[in-house]
């Protein structure tokens, strides 16, 4: 059972927790090279929370707990001195000395808590523990896990009154204790769930999936707050950008306690905000509309990124810069691109340059100057978006353009596959292709429901999905294009098709054709759905639907024309033309794939002076251009080898 135990009042737990500190280390833990900052951090968290129960107004009120505090403070000092050398280690040891002295002098709990928390934060900055949720936790889903694993000790509602509580010494923590809950962070709760506490009923639950442990941490951390506090917190979070700036990322939320937040904002506001975010941590990643314009979230994250960079936290600055674009700009992109495509490209380029500067360690003054340029572009974009004279026309054109632009790439691949199978007289394999693109449409519908009603899809996940699928399709198309070019030169089509295609298509390639059709279509459906969700509005709904219908008609007409044309072409010429088109499409997709992964922060980005031609997948960065050049060269080499081999075979046949 998961059981968080209350600090004891007797010396028994002093020995138990001291044993936990040492026993959880290897036998040689006294050696500096094997010290662990995680344990030092955990003890600092205990000091910050429990010291108030030991000392009040300069007097020891519970001797056993005070002895614990002394023991923990001394152990922290020893642990920090034993850690591997780091630039800030001497300062950490000096802070630990001040903490030891403060505990010995029985200073007020507020001062000791501030010293312990400040030192804990600095320990994390100098020796990162690295525990950050991979995705926003889902506390609501942890209710069943809590009932199964925790309620027997902590009680069904977290009051510490479970059926097994009476037999535990020390007794379980009451999660509904507001004073205690205000001092704990989700990270601290996660650590206790993961590590356990030796000498108590709280065992380690490291065997639980990491996502479940984070969900439990947020869930139990929310039990002290009322539904009304969560409602008030949601209202505050949505209307106050300054408050949102205090907790800009999910990582920051995991390290934030109510007491810590109350040091910079009103105490009631801090309680409400924490109540809301503990119950809905994904809110930190969701764009919030307010009265400052559609780029409010982008401006906020951009400013936070500047502050983090100026403070020397490059990783955080880069993460915030990515969020500024992915979560703050991309939702507005469909509408802005329809009204002023050049301005949209300028914003993308300027923000890419900003991220590059951060990654290259550019001087803060230059980074700030780039941020000013981006802010000016936001101002221009908001002026464009405020012009409502052409709202209906803009919505129609945006809807139409998005569907046709995204649909054509998938159409080229799927129609090419269908035409090929018809030419090869392999119609019995066509159901696999049809199942692929139909399945992709159904998966797109599920994506729409998930993105609309269940969870938000972050900008990073969106770009990673698009990038990986584009690269997969590019690799497949390159190989298919070279193969088709080879067959266009070989002659004797009927013999080849009847002798080879039956076995190849039925045994090995049918499933592969299904996967290619699915990936090619789902990639475009995924992006299209998210664009439509972003641009949807009730006022322009009729125009958006009209654009969707018009785009569908155009795509259907193009598909019909392509199928008709493919029937009229001789099979050799069909394969020759198709191989070239497929190779070109592979070059386009690899450019788009690399660009998407760059926007997600998975691939570095070095800008270059070059045109930006999105429909060709051309983006102004060395990485994307070199990837396209590599695929183009690979296709050219494949075509060249095919041609030479064909000529050699022809000469041998004549001789």
Image (spheres, rainbow, N blue to C red):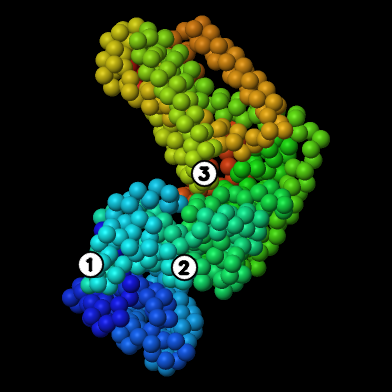
Vertical arrangement, residue 567 with respect to residue 201, above or below? above
Can you identify the residue that label 2 sits on? 178
Q: CA distance from mark 1 to mark 3?
A: 44 Å
Marks 1/2: CA–CA distance: 24 Å
Label 1 Cα neighbours within 10 Å, binned few <14 / some 14-19 / many ≥20: few
Front residue of 18/511: it is 18
Q: Secondary structure at mark 1?
A: helix
Q: In terms of image quadrants, where is residue 62?
A: bottom left
- Secondary structure, mark 2, is helix
Residue at 47 percent across and 18 percent down: it is: 416
Q: Percent position (x, y) of residue 320? A: 55, 58
Disc 1 or disc 2, which is closer to the eye? 1
Query: At 62% across and 16% down in the image, what residue appears?
Result: 553
Front position among marks 3 and 2 = 2
Any mark on residue 456, and which?
A: 3
Locate the N terminus by quadrant. bottom left
Element type at mark 3: loop
């Amino acid at each position: 059972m998961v059981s968080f135990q209350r600090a004891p009042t007797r010396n028994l737990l002093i020995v138990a927790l001291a044993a936990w500190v040492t026993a959880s280390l290897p036998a040689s833990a006294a050696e500096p090279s094997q010290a662990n900052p995680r344990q030092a951090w955990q003890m600092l968290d205990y000091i910050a929370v429990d010291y108030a129960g030991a000392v009040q107004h300069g007097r020891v009120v519970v001797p056993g707990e005070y002895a614990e505090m002394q023991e923990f403070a001394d152990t922290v000092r020893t642990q920090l001195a034993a850690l591997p050398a780091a630039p800030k280690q001497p300062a950490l040891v000096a802070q630990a000395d001040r903490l030891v002295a403060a505990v010995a002098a029985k200073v007020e709990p507020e001062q000791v808590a501030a010293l312990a928390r400040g030192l804990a934060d600095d320990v994390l900055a100098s020796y990162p523990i690295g525990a950050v949720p991979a995705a926003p936790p889902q506390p609501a889903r942890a209710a069943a896990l809590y009932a199964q694993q925790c309620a027997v000790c902590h009680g069904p509602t977290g009051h510490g009154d479970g059926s097994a509580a009476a037999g535990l010494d020390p007794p379980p923590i009451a999660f509904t204790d507001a004073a205690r809950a205000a001092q704990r962070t989700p990270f601290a709760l996660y650590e206790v769930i993961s590590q356990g506490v030796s000498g108590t009923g709280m065992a380690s639950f490291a065997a639980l999936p990491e996502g479940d442990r984070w969900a439990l941490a947020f869930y139990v951390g929310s039990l002290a707050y009322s539904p009304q506090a969560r409602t008030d917190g949601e209202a505050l979070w949505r209307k106050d950008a300054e408050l949102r700036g205090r907790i800009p990322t999910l990582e920051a939320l995991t390290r934030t306690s109510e007491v810590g937040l109350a040091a910079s904002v009103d105490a009631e506001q801090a309680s409400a905000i924490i109540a809301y975010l503990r119950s809905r941590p994904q809110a930190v990643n969701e764009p919030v509309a307010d009265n400052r314009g559609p780029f409010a979230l982008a401006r906020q994250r951009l400013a936070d990124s500047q502050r983090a960079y100026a403070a020397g936290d490059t990783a955080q600055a880069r993460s915030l810069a990515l969020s500024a674009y992915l979560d703050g700009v991309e939702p507005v992109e469909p509408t802005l691109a329809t009204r002023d495509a050049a301005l949209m490209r300028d914003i993308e380029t300027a923000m890419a340059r900003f991220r590059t500067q951060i990654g290259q360690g550019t001087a803060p003054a230059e980074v700030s100057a780039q941020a000013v340029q981006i802010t000016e572009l936001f101002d221009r974009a908001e002026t464009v978006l405020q012009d409502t004279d052409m709202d209906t026309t803009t919505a129609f054109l945006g809807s139409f353009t998005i569907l046709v632009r995204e649909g054509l790439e998938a159409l080229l691949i799927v129609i090419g596959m269908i035409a090929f199978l018809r030419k090869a007289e392999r119609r019995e394999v066509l159901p696999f292709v049809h199942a692929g693109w139909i399945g992709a449409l159904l998966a797109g519908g599920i994506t729409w429901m998930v993105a609309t009603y269940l969870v938000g899809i972050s900008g990073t996940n969106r770009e990673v999905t698009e990038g990986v699928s584009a690269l997969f399709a590019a690799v497949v198309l390159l190989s298919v294009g070279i193969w088709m070019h080879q067959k266009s030169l070989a002659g004797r089509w009927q013999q080849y098709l009847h002798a080879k295609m039956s076995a190849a298509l039925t045994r090995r390639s049918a499933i592969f054709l299904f996967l290619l059709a699915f990936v090619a279509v789902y990639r475009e459906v995924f992006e299209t759905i998210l664009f439509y969700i972003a641009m949807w509005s009730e006022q322009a709904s009729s125009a958006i639907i009209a654009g969707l219908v018009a785009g569908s008609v155009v795509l259907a007409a193009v598909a019909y024309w392509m199928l008709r044309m493919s029937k009229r072409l001789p099979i050799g010429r069909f394969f020759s033309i198709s191989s070239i088109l497929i190779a070109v499409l592979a070059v386009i997709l690899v450019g788009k794939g690399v660009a998407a992964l760059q926007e997600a922060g998975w691939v570095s980005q070095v800008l270059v002076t070059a045109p930006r031609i999105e429909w060709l997948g051309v983006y102004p960065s060395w990485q994307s251009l070199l990837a396209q050049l590599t695929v183009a060269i690979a296709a050219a080499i494949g075509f060249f080898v095919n041609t030479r081999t064909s000529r050699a075979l022809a000469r041998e046949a004549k001789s």
